[in-house]
Each structure stands twice: as structure tokens, then as C-alpha cells.
Image (cartoon, rainbow, N blue to C red):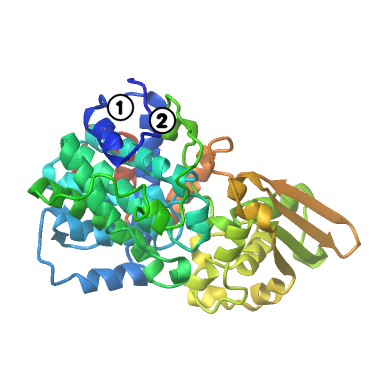
Amino acid sequence: MAELHPQPGNLAAFAEWIAQTPVITHPVALETARAAFEDTIACMIAGAGDPATLAVAKGVSHSGTGPCPVGGQDVSRPAEVAALVNATAAHALDFDDNFLPAVTHASAVLVPALLALGAEVDANGDDLLDAYVVGLEMQAWLGHFMIPAHYGAGWHATSTIGAIGAAAACARLLDLDREKTTHALSIACSMAGGSKVQFGTLTKPLHAGLAARAGIAATRLAEGGVTANPDPVFGDWGIIALQNGNQTHASNKRSELSIVVDGLAQKRFPCCGSAHRSLDAIIYLRTKHDLKPDQIDRIETEIPGSNYDNLRFPTPKTASEARFSMTYCGALAMIFGQVRLSDFTADAVMRPEVRSFMDKIAMQDAGLVSRTAGGIWDCPARTSIFLRTGEVLQKDVMAPVGTINTPLSAADIDTKFSDCTDGKTGPGLRAEIRAICREIRGYRAREILRW
């Protein structure tokens, strides 16, 4: 593979790499991308009937038909519309992966955008995987300058950085030249927005849909001749300055792809990733010491500031709020030793045994050090379980299960796929979908979306 310079001086230089770098052949990159498609498709199936997805689908029902299937519906739409609905579904249950260098739900944006555009242009699996890796690299490049300040200031990076990464992936899929790729990325910068104030609402998963749609729209507009400033990232009016980034961030030049170096953070719990390290610790201590809920006096967990801010609902009233509640998710982990999709329904959230245990869980902000530099991931989550006997059990977790050094096990992956698809498809179709995901390079985009 040609040397990769993921920190070029401006967007036009990155566009040149997108347009001219050879097809990605790195086996780890391609396998990680394939796994991302499998994981995201499972999340799309699970989220197809979520209220957020159904509301978005209803809102665009006037948009006409097209060549791109919409998951869970007997209708096909134009690519931008299909991407909007399918990406909302992928992110609706907060079970989709994270990409730590950009603090984005990268695959919930990239996979639906590429499947929709791929269905329109009849792309094959190899094309999709190559474009996915390129789009992820774009997110990593921006994340180097934007994170953690951008995310800490309240921007939802899935919607901002995600839109620009989707444009990079789509430009790669359409094989645009350097000039048009530059314009596509610049147009996407003008479409990048979204605040974390929407966490706990139906608009939070819509952010993934908006980013996926923006990536396709920006690319098609550039292909049609719309031009834009070739450097909308740096300078006084660039997105780094306007959206709380750092223009003087130290160079991070390397010759390897981010998907290989950083990997993806696939989730084993269907809730905000900010809680996952604490949940890992609770389940680890519960299992190691064979703990029962009635043995617990209280649980305290100290987490980085940006994670703390995300978990905004100590007494959630809805399933959407419960996904952003440390007290609720922590109670599930201690009582049941797991957190499943079935725990996020209106009735499940109000279970008396869970509500009463929530009072025993306290969350603390790790403070300023965890809000600066790489503090989101350099600062561990420290969880302490205080037993009624007076004994204190403690566990520090630096990175959640599902990240590159502690990946999901084969059993975890099987359990997650089943949790996402049980009751949503028949066993025959579920097996077929799984087989397609495992051999994605041999299929066309429209076949991959056939469910």
C-alpha cells in the first residue's frame, strides 16, 4: 500500500489522497470494515421499527421511489432518502459502534450512506469496503484537530465530522477526481452540524441520518458542478475555529491506516458508550465475587468529564433517556449481569426492582484533567462497589470491551446479532443475512440491503 499521510496541510491535499491512492488491500483494514458492515446491518435491522426511524420514514414518505431499499419497509427510495432512514435506524438503539479518534458513531453514518449510494450505482462489496476505509480515515484526520475540544463543547461529532467523512467515502465510491472531491468535502463542511443537547430525543439518532444524507448530497452536488472554498477547515472562518477545534495540534504523521492502528469500538451494550467502562467493571466484579444485589450498599463510578456530561438522566422516564443514564444501566448490570435491547422499553424502564436499585448508584466527574488533551480515553473509569459488610471492591477500566485491544468475543458477536435480529426476521432470512455479511465482497450493494 502507498504511504498514507493522514495529516496533510489542508482539505485539498486530503482530497488528492482520496482520489489517487490505490485500492485499499490491507487485510486487517478490509476485515475490520467487513465486520463493521455486519455489526451495523444488525443494528439497522434492530432499529428499523424504532419510533425515531418510523417518524423519519413517515416524514420523507412524499420523497418518491428510487433504486435504494429502505430496511424493514416494502419501498425503495432515492439514495439520499434511503440513507437518511437507514442511518437513523442504525443509530436508533445506540448499539452501533464508536470510532474513538473522532468520537463518532462512524459506521452508522458510513455504512447506510455507502449501501444507498452503492445500490444506486450498482457497486460491489469490494467497492464498499474500500470507500468505507477512506471515509473513516477522513474522520480520523478531522478528529486529530477537533477532538476532544469539539466534542466537549457540545458538538455531536457523529453529525459534524461524520458528514464530512461520509462525503469522503461517497466521493471515493463515485471515483471523483481531486478537484471534485475537494468541492464535495468543502460542501459537506457547510452541512456539518448537530448538538449533544439532542441526546435522549428522537433527533439524536436522526443526526446519523442527516450526516449520511449530507455525504451523498455533497458528493452529488460537487459531481454536478457546484464549487466551494478548497480550504474550509483551517483559518479564522474554518470549521476548526468555528467548532472548537485546535489548529495547532501536533502532527500525527504516520504511514498506516487509522482503521488498523485504532480499530473500531463495537458495543456489547445497547446504550451510550460513555457508560460502558463502568458497566464492564460492574459485571467483572459481579462475576469475580459472585455478587448479589442484596449484598450491595452502593456503587460509585468516576468517569471522564465528557462521558459524565453525556449521561444526563439520573431518573430516566423513557427508553431514549434510559440509554443515557448511568444509574439505570448500572442497575441493569448489577441486577442481571447484562444489558439487553429488551431493557429499553417503556415498561422495562419502570420496573420497581430496577428503580429502587438506581438509588444505590452514584456517578462522579473525574474533573478537568479528563476534559483536556486525550483525557476522554487517557483517564480511566474507576468503579467502586461498597458491600454491606464494609468491604470495597474496585476496578479501573481504560478502554471498554469491544475496542481494539479487548475486542468482542465470537460469542459476544453472536449474542449481539441474535439480540438485534430475533423477532425482526425469520430464521432463514437471518441466516442468509449473516452469510451475506460474512462474504460481503461477493455481493452487490442492493443484495446486501435486501432484508
- Find the distance from the CA under tag 1 to the CA under tag 2: 10 Å
Decide: marks 1, 2 in contact (CB < 8 A)? Answer: yes
Q: What is the x, y in percent for residue 287? A: 72, 50
Mark 2 lies on a secondary structure that is: loop
* Image quarter of the N terminus: top left
Q: Looking at the picture, how far across and down is residue 273, in whole percent?
A: 54, 55
The disc at residue 24 is 1
Mark 1 residue type: Ile
Residue 336 appears left or right of 44: right
Residue projecting furthest to the right: 390
Q: Which of disc 2 and disc 1 is earlier in sequence? A: 1
Q: Which residue is drawn at 63% across and 64% down?
A: 332
- Identify the secondary structure beneath mark 1: loop
Up/down of 77 relative to 116, above or below = below
> Residue 59, how many percent across, how many down?
22, 73
* Neighbours of disc 2 within 10 Å: few (<14), some (14-19), many (20+): many
Q: Label for residue 51?
A: none
In the image, farthest residue toward the front: 236
The relative height of residue 272 versus residue 266 in the rendered view (above or below) is below
Tell me the residue at 36%/49% (across/down). Answer: 235
Residue to which mark 2 is pinned = 257
Count of numbered circles on the image: 2
Question: Residue 280 appears at what percent x and percent y?
Answer: 64, 51
